[in-house]
Image: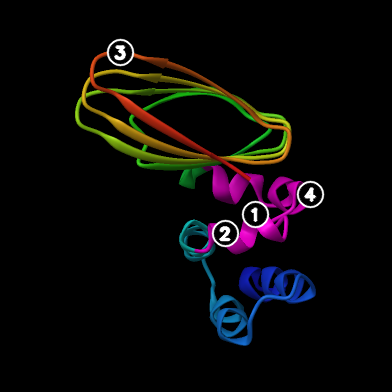
Amino acid sequence: MKLGKHIGILAKDKGICEGHLKKIMGFTQAKQLVDMYFSGSDWAFKNDFPSVEIMRTYKGMVEPLNMLVDAEKTLHNPRRVGIFGNSNITIEVDGFQVSEIYVRHNSNLQIIAKGDVKVFVTQGDNATVNVVKEGNAVVKIFKR
């Protein structure tokens, strides 16, 4: 079964609207789904979509796109990141970077922000976020 069709069927069960369902059903690449996740994160959080089980199924496809599942690693200056499952992630942001981070499930996130950065974090489920700031760094955390 095509990737988009499989994810579309699962999203339909969660009540996704017809317009977005039609888009998803035509997707053939994981990047298209990841882009849609970031643009529709409110719906995704509200509907626990994708679930941790779905993320684990497609882990190999989405991790190169900064959708981390049960991962343990350090990232430097990512533009956007989704963190799922039981991940332990450190994100270092410096310079004049803007980062968008979504952390879910039982993941632990440490952010080290230095300089004139802006970091926006959406935190859900049982995820934890710890922040170390230096300089003019701004870190905003939105809890779901």
- Depth check: give the residue in front, 122 or 22: 122
Image spot of residue 64 (x, y percent) = 49, 43
Mark 2 and mark 1: span between their CA atoms?
Answer: 5 Å
Which three-letter amino acid code belongs to the residue tagged 3? Glu
Q: What secondary structure is marked by label 4?
A: helix
Residue 21's label in the rendered image is: none
The local crowd at label 2, few if under 14, some if 14 to 19, many if 20 or more residues have their Cα within 10 Å, is: few
Q: Earlier in the sequence, mark 3 or mark 4?
A: 4
Q: The magenta stretch spans which residues? A: 40-63
Q: Earlier in the sequence, mark 1 or mark 4?
A: 1
**Disc number lying in front (1 or 4):** 1
Q: Earlier in the sequence, mark 3 or mark 1?
A: 1
Residue 134's label in the rendered image is: 3
What residue is pinned by disc 2? 42
- Depth check: give the residue in front, 42 or 25: 42
- Residue 103: quarter of image: top right
- Residue 126: quarter of image: top right
What residue is pinned by disc 1? 45
Mark 1 and mark 4: span between their CA atoms?
Answer: 15 Å
Q: Is residue 48 magenta?
A: yes
Image spot of residue 101 (x, y percent) = 47, 40
